[in-house]
Image (cartoon, helix red, strand yellow):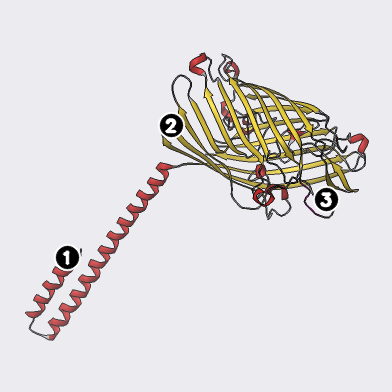
Amino acid sequence: MKKVIKLSFAASLATLSLSASDTDLQSKINSLEAQIKEIKAVQAKSNDAIEERVDKIETSTMTDKIDFGLDFRTRVDNFEAKDASGDKTSSKNVWSNRLRLNMNSDIADDMKFTGRLSMYKNWSDTGSSYLYSSMDPMQGRRPSDSGVFVERAYIDWTAISGLVPVTFTIGRQPSSDGPSHQFKDNTVRKATYSALSFDGAADGIVATANLQKVTGVKDMALRIGYGKGYQDDTTYTYVGDASAIKDTNVLGAFLDSGLGIDGSLLQLSVVGATDVVSNTTNSSGANTNTNIGDVILYTAMLEFTNLSNSGLDLFAHYAISQSKPNGVTSNQATPYGDYPMGLLTNTPGDTEQKDGHAFWLGTRYTMPIESMKNPKIGVEYNQGSKNWFSFTQGSNSLTNKLATRGSAVEVYYIQPINRYASLRFGAEMIDYEYVGSGYQIGTPMSVSDMGGATLDKLNNFYLLFNLIY
């Protein structure tokens, strides 16, 4: 392009030298300026085209490395509560937005990356009233401000191939929205572990041995996992201090297996957490966190998806929790002052094991009405005993219904809009029999014995729009 300008300029000078009058000279100058402007315009247009092609190449290079997916939800909830004295309260027309950006990347034949960035907030809320959203399992899982959290970020590395391939899952695990939430959420299965016992963000390492080839059983796999429920990253300041809080170590084993029926899955698991932390403050606002004992969860899960191509989905979960307090209590702030509380106990020095159990049943049916894009209806029921305790504090549900010490019923209707978007209408009805559902501190007292303002029943009627693309 520069050569073109130089040649044009030289030619114009030659022409000027042959001119016979000033008028002709001015005419040639004007012609020269016009030519230069035209050449600059052509050059600028060429540069813009080159830059646009470079931008497209750079964008393509990035998207070729990482595939992005969109998950967006807007929801309105209407809560109605009744306490043990019969008084009723409500919180209606509560709107929220949830945004998830899903990421996938094939690093190599034996290694891939998966991630999820999440924002979840109530409309016009700064997150100041949701203090628990700062706790690790709840980040991106409960309403907060408009900040984006890394809810998942892990590498799947098939380090051993052959008859029994072994894959290591390293990082922030796929431990939230587990089975059987996929039916109500109208998605494919999004996580590994029964949502009755565990739901929330978690960091760890899981080794999965694929047993399909060696056993001939479809979907058979054995998983061994290790993680932290709490990690004291300031322990170097407490060297030799016996009062320092110990890490909460989590170890689990999971056996998955198909049952010879398309869409079937059985999972048996045991998960233990040692040195569970109290996460408490006293009435003076001082942090009184301490280790209060150990918890073991035994869980069995059974799922049937589109059973015999009937459009019917079925699932059942059953779990046993064994909470073993270590006799240590911490002063927990209550309306009546500081009160000593341990792992499911109020008795100082108590080391007696507290056994609890829960089950969760559900079904969904896809109606063969093509003119309505095959809507779905579903119903779920769960029930938990007095000492039932699970690690579901990071549930995406504000009611955390699966932690209920009592019973809960949910019914819903899903209306597809297109292949990516749908509407869901639903109702949750929870009847609490014991206080402290989902909380590990203090003896679960009977609602009727507590009386007064103790929460007895909670209903929620909701509508949501969901888009997964």
Residue at coordinates 82% horizontally, 35% vertically from top-left?
344
- Which element is circle 2 on? loop
Picture layout, residue 173 above or below residue 216: below
Which residue type does callout 2 highlight?
Asp
- Total of numbered circles in the picture? 3
Which residue type does callout 1 highlight?
Val
Graded by Cα atoms within 10 Å as few (under 14), some (14 to 19) or many (20 or more), the crowding at tag 2 reads: few
The magenta stretch spans residue 219: no
Q: Is residue 152 left or right of residue 353?
A: left
Q: Position of residue 311 (x, y in %)?
A: 60, 21
Of the pair 389 and 396, the residue shown nearer to us: 389
For the question of whether residue 419 can be seen, the reply is no
Q: Position of residue 268 (x, y in %)?
A: 65, 22
Q: Which residue is mark 1?
A: 4
Residue contact at pointers 1 and 3, CB within 8 angstroms: no
Q: Is residue 274 left or right of residue 173?
A: right
Considering only order in the chain, which callout, 3 or 1, is on the residue closer to the N terminus?
A: 1
Res 306 label? none
Of the pair 62 and 354, the residue shown nearer to us: 354
Picture layout, residue 385 above or below residue 33: above
Stretch of the chain drawn in magenta = 285-289
Q: Position of residue 175 (x, y in %)?
A: 61, 35
Picture layout, residue 109 above or below residue 115: above
Q: Which residue is mark 2?
A: 110
Residue contact at pointers 3 and 2, CB within 8 angstroms: no
Indicate which label's residue lies in the foreground, 2 or 1.
2
- Which element is circle 3 on? loop
Considering only order in the chain, which callout, 1 or 2, is on the residue closer to the N terminus?
A: 1
Which residue type does callout 3 highlight?
Asn
Q: Position of residue 370 (x, y in %)?
A: 56, 26
Q: Which residue is mark 3?
A: 282
